Image (cartoon, rainbow, N blue to C red):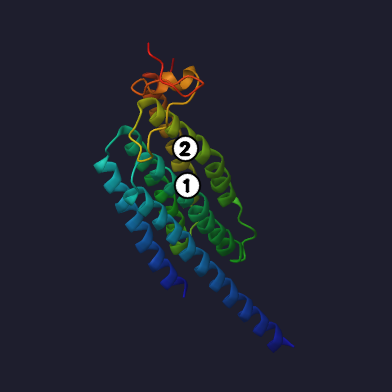
Amino acid sequence: MENLTALVATQTEHLLEIAVSALIVIGAAFTFIGSLGLARLGDFYTRLHGPTKATTLGVGALLIASVIYFSTRGEGPSLHEVLVTVFLFITAPVSAHLLAKAALHLRVRSIAPPPLAVEGADAGQLRADVPRTNSAGRTESS
Amino acid sequence: MLSTALFIAFTLVCGALLLSLWRLLLGPDHPDRILALDTLYVNTIALLVLLGILLGSALYFEAALLIAMMGFVGTVALCKYLLRGDIIE
């Protein structure tokens, strides 16, 4: 019976180590892929896409690995990693939104083709160099 | 096994830091640089968590939390400056 308990404890420890190692490698890989996207993608709006993966999946997996690692060391559950996770998950969309707003405000170059002249005053204000079209599709003379 | 995983992870995160630094130096626009700084903060948090696991010390999470807060405030302040030309109006 004692042998069985010891065997179960060893197996559990082994499984936990495998889980922690896998989560660490997955998280680091996502962090690397996020920065690779930041370095390699074509313009700012596509570059904004990469680091969000690093924030949510990469750091999230690393912090889950940390929770498992420190919770199974016999000092009770360790939950202050959850604070970092919650803070990052709340702030990442806010900062991405503000960055996109700043880029749109500064009219940063985009690899997407410029939008065709759309009806309405807003479109005309956005693209002053494109001739406005009226509802029939003809170009206005003035 | 854990030490091998930690070695791989440290290599990957340091590569991520170098790629973000490259984008920070290259630009070409101000939002690109701010985004690269934000990514550097996130990569540093990942590196600190890995260091905490390697050394078996829970001391580094306070530092990670502080970096997360300061990084967010810095990003918001820089974006606000780009948007409005002023930080506190």
Residue furthest out toward the right: A1
| Cβ–Cβ under 8 Å for marks 2 and 1 | yes
Q: Residue furthest top?
A: A142
**How many neighbours does mark 1 have within 10 angstroms: few (below 14), some (14-19), or many (20 or more)?**
many
Is A16 drawn above or below residue A3 in the view shown?
above
Quarter-wise, where is residue B16 in the image?
A: bottom left
Where in the figure is residue A110, as x and y percent of width and height? 35, 37
Res. B56 in view: no
The residue beneath circle 1 is: A52
Which subunit holds the residue at mark 1? A
Residue beneath the point at 58% across and 58% down: A67
Say what secondary structure mark 1 lies in. Answer: helix
- In percent of the image, x 54 and y 61: which residue is there? A65
Mark sitting on residue A33:
none
| Quadrant of the snapshot with the C terminus of chain A | top left
Q: Chain of mark 2?
A: A
Under tag 2, what secondary structure?
A: helix
| Position of B46 relative to A86 (above/below) | below
Q: Are marks 2 and 1 on the same chain?
A: yes
Residue A58: in sight, yes or no? yes
Q: Position of residue B62 (x, y in %)?
A: 49, 46
Q: Tell me if residue A117 comes above or below residue B45 in the rendering.
A: above
Q: Amino acid at mark 2?
A: Ala
Residue, x 38% and y 51% (percent of image)? A37
How far apart are labels 2 and 1 at the CA level?
Answer: 8 Å
Which residue is farthest left?
B26
Q: Residue A30: x, y in percent? A: 45, 58
Q: Which numbered disc flags the more N-terminal residue, 2 or 1?
A: 1
| Figure check: A16 above or below A96 | below
| Amino acid type at image mark 1 | Thr
The residue under label 2 is A96
